[in-house]
Every structure is written in structure tokens, then in C-alpha cells.
Image (tube, grey):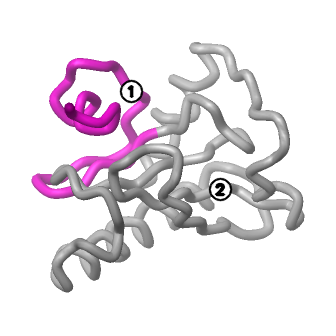
Amino acid sequence: MASIFTKIVKGEIPAYKIAEDENFLAFLDVFPLAKGHVLVIPKQEIDSIFDLSDESYTNLWLFAKKTAKALKRVMPCKRVGIAVIGLEVPHAHIHLIPLQNVEDINFSKPKLKVEDAEMKGIAENIKEKF
């Protein structure tokens, strides 16, 4: 069965897309730890990031780097934090999270509820800086 991320790639589930090319996709997390929390995925459905080919692995990180730079230009933060956990969705992905302090990347804290209009605005602003 296709992962929720594969369904997003195929357009079966809507997403607040930030950037996309033939191999990768970046979009806002709908259950964010902080406003502007982005997920970066390979379009190819692979469960673990370490199962990607060396080329895909490297290119995923380069795509994430470009996304993080655009994110930093838009969201006020001290840093953009990075997390690869891999337990939530069986599809390799990188979390990019705007950070003011270390607690902003604590995955056990409650997720934010951000209104649709604000999510669309954040996505558009980051997309413009990509």
C-alpha cells in the first residue's frame, strides 16, 4: 500500500508544496512542531533514508539544503533544525524545523494547529524564496 507521502506525490492528497523537481518534493508538515515545519522527501517510495542509492541520498540532502535556505529567509528563526526519525511514515523524509531553542525540535511536545490560510501563506512565501 502506498504511503501517505506517495499519495501526496501522486496528487491524491493535497499538500502545501514548497518546491518540487523530478525526484524530490518539499511541503509543509500539517502537524508542525513550529510554523514553517517542512518535510523533504524523495518521490520514490523507500522506507528508510539509508536504503536510498548514494546518488539519491546525496541529492535529497542538497534539495533539503536549498529548501532550508529558503525557509530561513521567510521564517524568523535562529537556525533551521534537521531531524530524520523515520518512524512516523514508512517513506524516507527529512524534517526541517525553524528553531528559536532546542525545545522547538522536541517531537514529544504537542503539535501546532495552523489555519489553512496561514499555511498557504507560509508555503507561498517559502516557495518564492526557493
x and y, in percent, of residue 98 in the image? 70, 56
At label 1, counting other C-alpha atoms closer than 10 Å, the crowd grade (few under 14, some 14-19, many 20 or more) is some
Q: Give coordinates of residue 54: x percent, y percent.
A: 20, 85
In the rendered image, which quarter is residue 33 located in? top right
Structural distance between the alpha carbons of marks 2 and 1: 17 Å
Q: Please tell me whether residue 5 belongs to the stretch shown in magenta.
A: yes
- Range of the magenta residues? 1-27
Q: Which residue is mark 2?
A: 97
Q: Residue at x 88, y 59 (%)?
A: 103
The relative height of residue 92 versus residue 122 in the rendered view (above or below) is: below
Amino acid type at image mark 1: Ala
Instruction: Please tell me the numbered disc located at residue 15.
Output: 1
Residue 79 falls left or right of residue 44: right
Q: Which corner quadrant holds the C terminus?
A: bottom left
Q: For numbered disc 1, what is the local secondary structure? A: loop
The mark found on residue 124 in the picture is none
